[in-house]
Amino acid sequence: MLLSSSPSLDTGAAQYPVQSQNLVTDNVEVVEGDVAVISCRVKNNDDSVIQLLNPNRQTIYFRDVRPLKDARFQLVNFSDNELRVSLSNVSLSDEGRYVCQLYTDPPQEAYADITVLIPPGNPIIESREGQVIEGNETEMTCTAMGSKPAATIRWMKGDKELQGISKVEETYDHMFTVTSQLRFIVTKEDDGVPVVCIVDHPAVKDFQALTYLVVHYKPEVKIIVEFPDGLPREGQNMELSCQAKGKPHPQQINWVKVDDDLPSHALITGTDLYIENLNKTYNGTYRCFAANSVGESYDDYTLYVYDAPTTTPIPTTATTTIPTTTISLPEATADTTPSAEPAAHDSRAGEGAPRAVDHAVIGGVVAVVVFAMLCLLIILGRYFARHKGTYFTHEAKGADDAADADTAIINAEGGHNNSDEKKEYYI
């Protein structure tokens, strides 16, 4: 595809001062077909006559009179200090040195050089091949013909400037043709990128032509697992999708198993590979090939089938709460309802259920009981120590005067008849 913009002509003329004593004029650059203005100016004029001559020394204007029969010359301004003349529809034949002449003694002259600028024709881009294969070198040429002076050519690929090699040829009519050659290696990222040939010339602005790169490249292949979502396990089904893109688009896609045949349960549908009822004999590397006119590419997927998941009963913690009813402690009666929150954060059996026995509480109770028994023993010991050997008897009076024990018993008050009244107290 080739696009070119129309040249934007510069209708103004560049002027450069030239002095000769009291007479001043300017050099002029003008684009072919535009208007050139020549100005002859006098400093401190003493009523001397001013006239303008063409490159052939023919008088164009003498004061405000035009002797030359060329209607393209028109008087713009005439005064004692200036003679200004315009030349319309300038052509290449009008180029040369014009003379401003002041009739003094001796006469004075000043020279105005008119340079005619001719813009080049529309630039033309040509490519060695219309379609470029990725990794190859491409060559483009841009030509700007029939300009004066010679144009310069620049290259842009996207937003990057590239350096070309230019050649300038001068034709028989003193015009110039410029040809620039550009070479570079293309990548697939260059596909669709604009390449612009920019022509720089004093007669035109924004003069360019462009073309778009068409790059062919071999397919890019990627295998996607459609299902299962997790690890492949025995008994499950599997689907692999082969995604391939290239230019031109891949027309052929094939599935193979590296170093082996595809499983008997494998089914190929379009770009997808479907395998039913996985088992470990299906382990291996599966490869997807994609091809177009440029070449062939592939991607691999290594299948490893895991064991089927085993079913285990859901553990329960109900039996672990039975011991909570076997101990009754005053400190524990305030809240007999166990909290279920810890069990919600741990799924392992038994963990998270409330503990039925607190060993610290049991130890404290035992210590209190032992301490109470010790205290009781100490109190009893002190009591027995204070009453050790103490008892009371009621014996008959006068027994002390008896000669022997028998006599004492006989002589006791009341004798045997009073034996009921004798009491002893001991502990």
Image (spheres, rainbow, N blue to C red):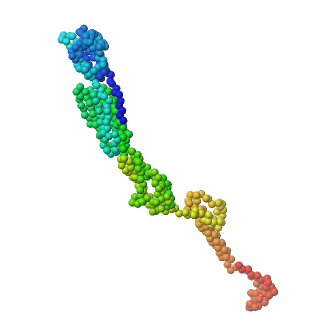
- For image coordinates 62% across by 66% down, the residue present is 323
- Give the image location of residue 409, x and y in percent: 77, 89
Is residue 93 visible to us here? yes
**Above or below, 301 relative to 29:** below
Of residues 422 and 97, which is closer to you in this image? 97
The residue nearer to you, when weighing 291 against 332, is 291
Q: Where is 256 relative to 246, above or below?
A: below
Q: Measured from the top left, where is residue 248 in percent x and y?
A: 39, 45
Q: Which of 158 and 250 is in front in this view?
A: 250
Q: Is residue 158 rendered to the left or right of residue 379? A: left
Residue at 26% x, 36% y is 165
Residue at 76% in and 87% down: 399
Query: Which quarter of the rendering shows the C terminus?
Result: bottom right
Residue 221 visible here:
no
How many numbered circles does the render carry?
0
Q: Where is residue 121 in the image (x, y as percent from the top left)?
A: 31, 28
Quarter of the image for residue 202 reads top left
Quick one: which residue is furthest to the left in this view?
Answer: 106
Q: In this view, does 289 lie to the left or right of 171?
A: right
Whether residue 377 is situated above or below residue 79 in the rendered picture: below
Image: 376 above or below 407: above
Residue that appears at 24% across and 32% down = 168
Where does the image place residue 414, in percent across and percent down from the top left? 81, 86
Q: Which of 3 and 163 is in front in this view?
A: 3
